[in-house]
Amino acid sequence: MNKKNFVIGLLFGIFALATNIFILVEAGTPGGASGMQSTGVSQAIGDAINTMVPSHPIDTSDPNYLSFMRKFIGHFSLFGVSGIFTILSLIFFLKDKFKSNWFVF
């Protein structure tokens, strides 16, 4: 393994580990506290969108909006980022072992 692939793989591995530690810590947060935190983040994002695009206001008190923000933006995106960093780490660590990166994927 050359040094460049090792360093890049190590960086992606650190990002993957940090993302997964964040997921585990947040998974241990009690439901009420987690819900309040999710609501606060969702309202902040809605307010930022309303500031940038005032002609299409988002109702940040709408439970459907809050559910979408929590489930799609929060969960899906966070697990997606974790998966991408993990796959990139494995590709760079195993790049010299396999002829095709698709095999690692």
Image (spheres, grey):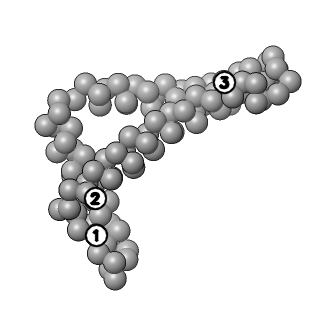
Residue found 54% across the figure and 33% down from its top: 83
Q: Secondary structure beneath disc 2? A: helix
Q: Is residue 65 left or right of residue 95?
A: left
Q: Using the numbered discs, state the Cα–Cα distance from disc 2 to disc 3 in whole angstroms.
A: 36 Å
Residue found 23% across the figure and 68% down from its top: 59
Quadrant of image for the N terminus: top right
Please tell me in which quadrant of the rendered image residue 58 appears: bottom left
x and y, in percent, of residue 16 in the image:
52, 29
* Label located before the other in sequence (2 or 3): 2
- The residue that mark 1 highlights is 58
Residue found 28% across the figure and 59% down from its top: 65
Whether residue 80 is visible here, answered yes or no, is yes
How many neighbours does mark 3 have within 10 angstroms: few (below 14), some (14-19), or many (20 or more)? some
Compare residues 80 and 4 and report the one nearer the observer: 80
- The residue that mark 3 highlights is 90
Q: Amino acid at mark 3?
A: Leu
Tag 1 near tag 2, CB within 8 Å: yes
How many neighbours does mark 1 have within 10 angstroms: few (below 14), some (14-19), or many (20 or more)? some
Compare residues 98 and 7 and report the one nearer the observer: 98
Q: Amino acid at mark 2?
A: Tyr
